[in-house]
Amino acid sequence: MDSLPTNAAANGTLGPRRTWSERAFSRVEAGSVRGSIFTLCCAAIGMGVLLLPYTMAQVGPLCSLSLLAVAAVAAHASLQICCAGMQATRTHSYTETLAALFSERVAGLLTLMLVVACFGLCCGYFVFASQLVHQVLQRAGVVCSRPTIVAVCAVCPVLPLACFRNLSDFRYLTMVSITGLSYLTLLVVCRSPHYVHSSGFSVSSLWHVH
């Protein structure tokens, strides 16, 4: 009899049920579902969405959509394989999964590949951010070189923020990033008809590859 309240609490039957507004607009806690969703979306989208217009201009819209579909299928299959491996080995990271399935050398090689990939992404973000800051400063009449902008950004905002240990500490910052990406997407969609009309777009350009 004493275990019934415990089981009921474990099943979530006790306590008042929160409304949708309380769940949607309440504080985002560390490790919460909303915070994880924001962090995952920000990390998954990243700078790749900013390169989509350039990629489509180079290989054509139809070819780009085909490549996106192939990449989506490959990403879904790889995630399924990773989840199955983690469940089978009862591990919680890629490195632990590979070490359990293969060897420590394979796990070390994967870690090295992840380090190189993360370093490349950081360099790409710095290049893109420095270009944007340089353009803003030029419009404001401030003369500053891009190497100086990169050095200042690396010392001032990046170094203190990089000292945080958990991604959950950036759960509110990721919301700002997603808002900016959403605004950029809306801007591209709204301005696309104007650019298509002014650039002399034709059906043959759908298959054009540079």
Image (cartoon, rainbow, N blue to C red):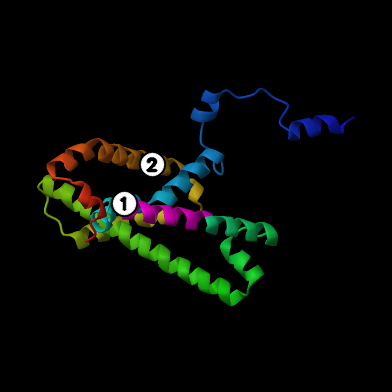
> Residue at 24% across / 59% down in the picture?
209
Label 2 SS: helix
Left or right: 203, with 155 as reference point: left
Q: Amino acid at mark 1?
A: Leu
Left or right: 103, with 173 as reference point: right
Outermost residue on the bottom side: it is 105
Picture layout, residue 109 above or below residue 203? below
> Residue at 13% across / 45% down in the picture?
200
Which image quadrant: the N terminus? top right
Q: Quadrant of residue 197?
A: top left
**Disc number placed over residue 62 in the picture, else none:** 1
The spot of residue 111 in percent (x, y) is 51, 69
Outermost residue on the right side: it is 1
The spot of residue 162 in percent (x, y) is 42, 56
Nearest to N terminus: mark 2 or mark 1: 1
Please name whichever residue, 114 or 134, is drawn nearer the observer in this view of the structure: 114
Please name whichever residue, 124 or 195, is drawn nearer the observer in this view of the structure: 195
Left or right: 169, with 181 as reference point: right
Picture layout, residue 36 above or below residue 118? above
Q: Quadrant of residue 104?
A: bottom right
Q: Let me know if residue 66 is in the magenta part.
A: yes
Visible in this render: residue 198?
A: yes
**Disc number placed over residue 83 in the picture, else none:** none
> Looking at the image, is mark 2 or mark 1 nearer the viewer?
1
Label 1 SS: helix
Q: Amino acid at mark 2?
A: Ile
Which image quadrant: the C terminus? bottom left
State which region is magenta: 62-76
Please name whichever residue, 64 or 186, is drawn nearer the observer in this view of the structure: 64
Tell me the residue that label 2 is attached to. Answer: 178
Picture layout, residue 51 above or below residue 200? below
SS majority, magenta: helix
